[in-house]
Image (cartoon, coloured by chain):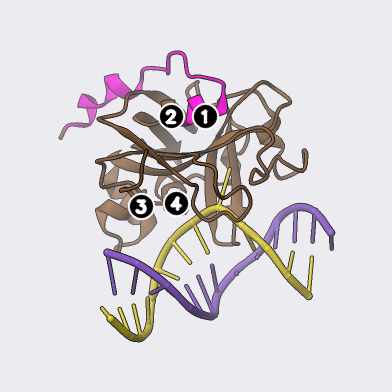
Chain colours: A brown, B purple, C yellow
DNA sequence: AGGATGATCGTCT
DNA sequence: GACGATCATCCTC
């Protein structure tokens, strides 16, 4: 597969990405994420997200703006990156108006381009299916870390979101790994996609 | 395929 | 001193 075959697609800036958190979480399914880290390009297509809307007790923004979560209170469509469990980074896309803390966690993606650098970053023992399957794995494969925290995502840079649309049906379920507001169905994923990280058989 | 566990560290109480 | 929007590994079925 030729690299330039993908280029016209992922060089398109995203048109009309929603600002509202849940709408954004759905709209991000199918969008491509391009990373230009350390002079290397890697591209993956988002297949699973979770919404953390305003007033959500499970959101890092719930208790107000802090040093760590200040990116969540920025303009929409910026990166919010944080370290979790001391071992992994999580990548979010900010949502809602400036000053309102909210965002969308990107949980899994389908590797499209730069598979070799992703394998190198993830380790030789990693199956291709698992390169970006999980929030911490995705950031590792794409070289996303604290340097990306707060960066805009709709212009060329270390990270850029490109246009895309979901293939087939979008499923939803409760969010993974949270204890507060655990009943809310705010996780979205491409139903038939094998690169989704969590349960794929749930409804509606 | 699915459940339990330890690693590891910044942030908050 | 406790707690995560997790992962890799080890275990059992």
Q: Magenta includes A87?
A: no
**Nearer to us: label 4 or label 1:** 1
User: In the rendered structure, which segment of residues is drawn in magenta?
Assistant: A2-25
Secondary structure found at label 1: helix
Callouts 4 and 3 close, C-beta under 8 Å: no
Label 2–label 3 contact, CB within 8 A: no
Numbered badge on residue A22: 1
Q: Which quadrant of the view contains residue A203?
A: top left
Q: Are marks 2 and 1 in contact (CB under 8 Å)?
A: yes
Mark 4 or mark 3: which is in front?
Answer: 3
Q: Residues within 10 Å of mark 2 (few under 14, many from 20)?
A: many
Give how far apart the Cα atoms at labels 4 and 2 are.
23 Å
Sequence-wise, the earlier of marks 4 and 3 is: 4
Q: Which residue: 32% across, 48% down? A: A200
Which residue is identified by label 3?
A: A199
Give coordinates of residue A48: x percent, y percent: 40, 40
Residue displayed at 55% across by 47% down: A183
- Chain for mark 1? A
Q: Is residue A81 above or below residue A14?
A: below
Asked if the residue at tag 1 contacts the one at tag 4, i.e. Cβ–Cβ closer than 8 Å, the answer is: no
Residue designated by label 4:
A140
Chain bearing tag 3 is A
Please tell me whether mark 4 or mark 2 is closer to you in this view: 2
- The residue at the point 46 percent across, 13 percent down is A16
Q: Are marks 1 and 3 on the same chain?
A: yes
1 or 3: tag closer to the N-terminus = 1
Are there few (<14), some (14-19), or many (20+) residues within 10 Å of tag 4?
many
Q: How many marks?
A: 4
- Real-space Cα distance between discs 4 and 1? 25 Å
């Amino acid at each position: 597969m030729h690299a330039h075959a993908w280029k016209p697609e992922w060089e398109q800036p995203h048109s009309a990405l929603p600002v509202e958190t849940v709408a954004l979480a759905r709209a991000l399914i199918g969008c491509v994420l391009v990373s230009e880290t350390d002079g290397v390009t890697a591209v993956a297509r988002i297949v699973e997200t979770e919404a953390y809307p305003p007033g959500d007790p499970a959101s890092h923004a719930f208790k107000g703006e802090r040093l760590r979560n200040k990116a969540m209170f920025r303009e929409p469509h910026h990166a919010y990156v944080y370290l979790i469990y001391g071992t992994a980074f999580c990548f979010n896309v900010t949502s809602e108006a400036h000053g309102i803390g909210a965002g969308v966690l990107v949980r899994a993606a389908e590797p499209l381009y730069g598979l070799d650098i992703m394998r190198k970053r993830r380790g030789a023992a990693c199956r291709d299916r698992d390169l970006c399957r999980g929030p911490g794995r995705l950031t590792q494969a794409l070289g996303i870390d604290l340097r990306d925290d707060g960066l805009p995502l709709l212009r060329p840079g270390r990270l850029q979101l490109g246009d895309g649309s979901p293939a087939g049906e979008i499923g939803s379920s409760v969010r993974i790994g949270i204890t507060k507001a655990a009943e809310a169905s705010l996780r979205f994923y491409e139903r038939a996609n094998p690169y989704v990280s969590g349960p794929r058989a749930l409804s509606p």
